[in-house]
């Protein structure tokens, strides 16, 4: 039996598997889930677990944040332009096809780049929500930018949509898929047939985008 960490929740109604970047497996289940049902669920998904762990091993190493290094940005890329600073005032600002970053050390530089991506994710996320919400027929109460390492997005029961800031490193078609996916959860808070019909209505080619996101997800990390 594959080793895993079990997480029970009174709010959860379905079983879910999560694999972190180190390959550790978490199993999220309803509070009253029976142990034998949990073990059966894990066994039935053994091939999926092995496939996801294999993808993690094939994931490229983190980008070296050196002067001139290129980082992905939606359908293109930006070159990092490092600016020396002895102060604590670190910053990241875009200048054309360059991202100018001032930081005292690599850790500070990495933090500033992540902060910049988060700001861009919020801006772009609002823009794409305004595009897709009329097509879906529902709009969220709030947009939140998150940094989960195992999820690209989520939709809460209160109508808050969360998007992973790393989506700014993915092609725009994949960003749009996650936005449409989470908006459809405002109509159907599950992954049943009705939910996927709504996604297909809004985005007829969603299956291709979904498969691409799964196949390439390990590449969208700093």
Image (cartoon, helix red, strand yellow):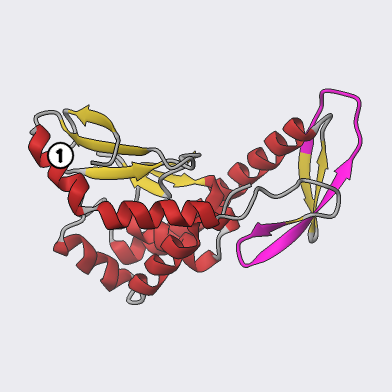
Q: Residue at x 66, y 59 (%)?
A: 72
Left/right placement of residue 208 relative to residue 4 reads right
Q: Name the residue under label 1.
A: 38
- Counting from the top left corner in percent of width and height, residue 166 is at 55, 49
User: Residue 73: within the magenta?
Assistant: yes
Can residue 38 be seen here? yes
Left/right placement of residue 75 relative to residue 45 reads right
Frontmost residue, 46 versus 14:
46
Image quadrant in which the N terminus is located: top left
Q: Residue at x 70, y 42 (%)?
A: 113
- Counting from the top left corner in percent of width and height, residue 153 is at 40, 48
Left/right placement of residue 215 relative to residue 199 reads right
- Counting from the top left corner in percent of width and height, residue 176 is at 45, 63
Q: Which residue is drawn at 76% across and 37% down?
A: 109
What SS does tag 1 mark?
helix
User: Residue 149: within the magenta?
Assistant: no
Frontmost residue, 155 versus 78:
78
Quarter holding residue 178: bottom left
Q: In this view, does 39 lie above or below 80?
A: above
Q: How many numbered discs, if any? A: 1
Frontmost residue, 110 versus 17:
17
Quarter holding residue 150: top left
Q: What stretch is highlighted in magenta?
A: 71-91
Can residue 183 be seen here? no
Q: Residue at x 9, y 41 (%)?
A: 37
Q: Is residue 221 above or below residue 51?
A: above
């Amino acid at each position: 039996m594959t080793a895993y960490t079990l997480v029970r929740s009174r709010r959860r109604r379905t079983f879910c598997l999560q694999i972190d970047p180190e390959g550790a497996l978490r199993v999220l289940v309803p509070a009253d889930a029976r142990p034998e049902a949990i073990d059966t669920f894990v066994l039935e998904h053994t091939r999926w677990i092995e496939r996801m762990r294999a993808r993690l091993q094939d994931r490229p190493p983190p980008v070296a944040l050196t002067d001139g290094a290129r980082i992905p940005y939606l359908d293109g890329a930006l070159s990092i332009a490092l600016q020396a600073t002895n102060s604590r005032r670190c910053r990241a600002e875009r200048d054309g096809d360059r991202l100018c970053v001032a930081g005292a050390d690599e850790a500070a530089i990495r933090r500033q780049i992540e902060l910049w991506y988060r700001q861009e994710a919020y801006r772009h996320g609002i823009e794409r929500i305004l595009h897709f919400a009329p097509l879906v027929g529902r709009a969220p109460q709030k947009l939140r930018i998150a940094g989960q390492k195992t999820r690209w997005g989520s939709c809460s029961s209160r109508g808050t949509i969360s998007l992973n800031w790393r989506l700014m490193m993915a092609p725009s078609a994949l960003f749009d898929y996650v936005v449409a996916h989470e908006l459809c959860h405002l109509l159907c808070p599950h992954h049943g047939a009705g939910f996927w019909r709504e996604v297909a209505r809004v985005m007829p080619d969603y299956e291709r985008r979904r498969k691409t996101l799964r196949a390439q997800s390990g590449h969208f990390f700093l």
